[in-house]
Amino acid sequence: MRIDIITVVPELLKSPFEASIMKRSIEKGLVEVHFHNLREYTTNNYKQVDDYQFGGGAGMVMMIEPIDKCISKLRSERMYDEIIYMTPDGDTLNQSTANQLSLKGNIIILCGHYKGVDQRVRDHFITKEISIGDYVLSGGELGALILCDAVIRLIPGVLGNETSALTDSFQDNLLAPPIYTRPASYKGWEVPPILTSGNFPKIEAWREEQAYQRTKDRRPDLLDE
Ligand code: ADE
């Protein structure tokens, strides 16, 4: 998968791709990530990418021209499956969207800043609008990173068997069951005996029951879906 991220603050984006799973996905050749500084696509001398709102109102708006130039250049080089705009009024990111995106070949992620982008960008270039939750960030960059992390770990081959995504919370609309590791007894706090019994069918049944109970207690909305 190739991910092109368009931003006015590329320095916010680099380090998460230099550690852990996202770094390994790039090293394995399964993912390519490219950052594009929108200021390099401006035609004015001040490298200005935003301007006042028509009609008045507080807050600057990202202009269409540099965004058009950047997206058009990328599209002249390859086909894109999705052009995603990170925005608090987009569809809330969930595991199903992450699963779908993990199967794509090339995607562009546009990070909004200030009040957001000129509506014509959304009308004419964007194929998907994603929010990471009902709160407003200073820009789309941190949201884009969260989206990348959620998607990249699902790309076949990125996670080994030991970290398989198949048993994650949400993967089957259930939260994950409780997990334990050594020691089996710590300060008198015991691991549920079933987990050390060696009876794998019973362990599996226990996990399913725990996952169901946890989902019922914490996120009953998931059981309705
Ligand atoms: N940009 C600002 N707030 C955001 C949010 N909640 N999700 C995605 N992008 C954003």
Image (cartoon, rainbow, N blue to C red):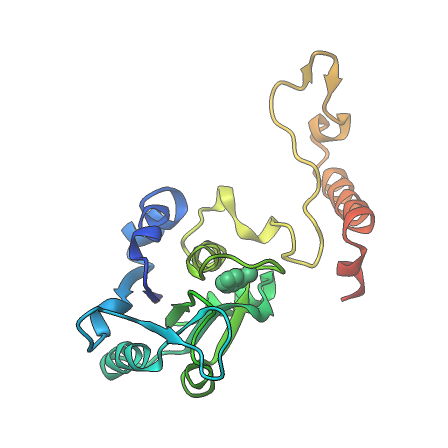
Residue 73, placed above or below residue 140: below
Could you tell me which residue is drawn at 59 percent across and 71 percent down?
Answer: 91
Residue 6, placed above or below residue 15: below
In front here: 146 or 159? 146
Residue 125, placed above or below residue 105: below
Q: Identify the residue at the far top of this view.
A: 187
User: In x, y percent, where is residue 98?
Assistant: 53, 63
- Tell me where residue 125 sits by quadrant: bottom left
User: In x, y percent, where is residue 155?
Assistant: 44, 60
Left or right of 115? Residue 188 is: right
In front here: 161 or 88? 88
Left or right of 108? Residue 192 is: right
Residue 172, placed above or below residue 190: below
Left or right of 218? Residue 110 is: left
User: In x, y percent, where is residue 178?
Assistant: 70, 37
Could you tell me which residue is drawn at 35 percent across and 53 percent down?
Answer: 13
Locate the N terminus by quadrant. bottom left
Locate the C terminus by quadrant. bottom right
User: In x, y percent, where is residue 124?
Assistant: 42, 88
Q: Identify the residue at the far left of this view.
A: 45
- Tell me where residue 44 sits by quadrant: bottom left
Could you tell me which residue is drawn at 77 percent across and 40 percent down?
Answer: 206
- Tell me where residue 196 sits by quadrant: top right
Left or right of 194? Residue 106 is: left
State how many labels appear.
0
